[in-house]
Image (cartoon, rainbow, N blue to C red):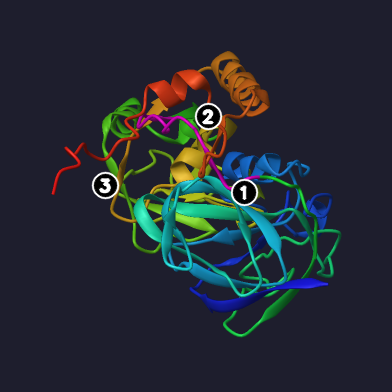
Amino acid sequence: MSALRVVAAGPGVAFQDGGRHGWLRFGVTGAGPMDRAAHALANRILGNAPGAAAIEVSLGGVELEAQGVVTLAVAGGDFAVTRDGRALPAQCIVTLAHGQRLRIRPGASGAWCYVALAGEFLLTPVLGSLSAHTRSHLGPPALAAGQEIAVTAYDLGADDSRLDVDAPADAAIRVLMGPQDDYFSPEQIALFQDSEWRVGGRSDRMAYTLEGPLLVPAHGFNIVSDGVAEGAIQVPGEGKPIVLMADRQPTGGYPKIANVIAADLGRLAQKRPGESVRFRAVTHDEAVAARRDAAARAAASLTLTPLLKTHFSSEELLGVNLVGGVVAGED
């Protein structure tokens, strides 16, 4: 049996699968990955189910050592990834021999990335899920230095490869207005839509705080508590909006001015504290179309480029200068 030994792990590095569903009526929210598209992509590279468990890596980073031979896939933000000190692409599939180490640290951009396994993490589900809900301590605990994670590893016979993906567009985050946007005056609605916001330093898996102008509802801050969805933008009494994320609470008593559409939640999640974000209101039909477009992109064929090329066509060989220099052959 193989294993992964945790050499180092920063805060917030934990297991996430597709989420803990069916328990919301008991006050248990689903958790799951902050960037669902990146999580599903890491699994898809290896042929896993989209909701299979993977390691979610925060800006704290992680270093893992293989005990046995394991094949892993990394996808998500533009993190700095190395194997035994040698740089790898931020989106890749890589095999670790026994004793080799995979190190992931913050890179050029992004707040989360995912490490999927060709095989199975041998962990005990809680309420049917391996997702870690950080505040309620449901699910497997966060990764810690010295921990050994038993795995069943499959040999895919896959070459180390780079996954070619398009960089996400730095466009406005699309939202559906409401359900309590009628608590805000037209001027406050315009202020929300026209302002540039910054992700606050107190942001975490439960909520991203937004720094910018204060929003003051015309009809007060208190409402009868109702259910909240992932991506809901609440406006509490201090007037600073907060976007509810994967570890959100099940209900809330503050008016919700808007809700981030599902297709854009991952892009928002990848914003680091201090980075700016703008919001753009769309219709329900536009939100559905965006979800369909995201699903189509997720189903499109993957382009994997081997990191070490061993087979060359005649055309490729003729196009490469294989001569390092020419000498006369004289003393």
On screen, residue 204 above or below 282? below
Residue visible at 64% across and 29% down in the picture:
298
Q: Residue at x 85, y 63 (%)?
A: 127
The reply to whether discs 2 and 3 touch (Cβ–Cβ < 8 Å) is no
Identify the residue position indicated by label 2 in the image: 312
What residue type is disc 3 on? Gly
Circle 2 crowding by C-alpha within 10 Å: few under 14, some 14–19, many from 20: few
Q: Residue at x 49, y 62 (%)?
A: 58
Q: CA distance from mark 1 to mark 3?
A: 26 Å
**Percent position of residue 208, x then y:** 44, 53
- Residue 21: percent from the left, percent from the top? 80, 50
- Precedes in sequence: disc 1 or disc 3: 3
User: In the image, what residue type sits under mark 1?
Assistant: Val
Name the chief secondary structure element in magenta.
loop
Using the numbered discs, state the Cα–Cα distance from disc 2 to disc 3 in whole angstroms.
55 Å
Q: Nearer the viewer, residue 112 or 107?
A: 107
| SS type, badge 1 | loop
Q: Which residues are magenta?
A: 159-173
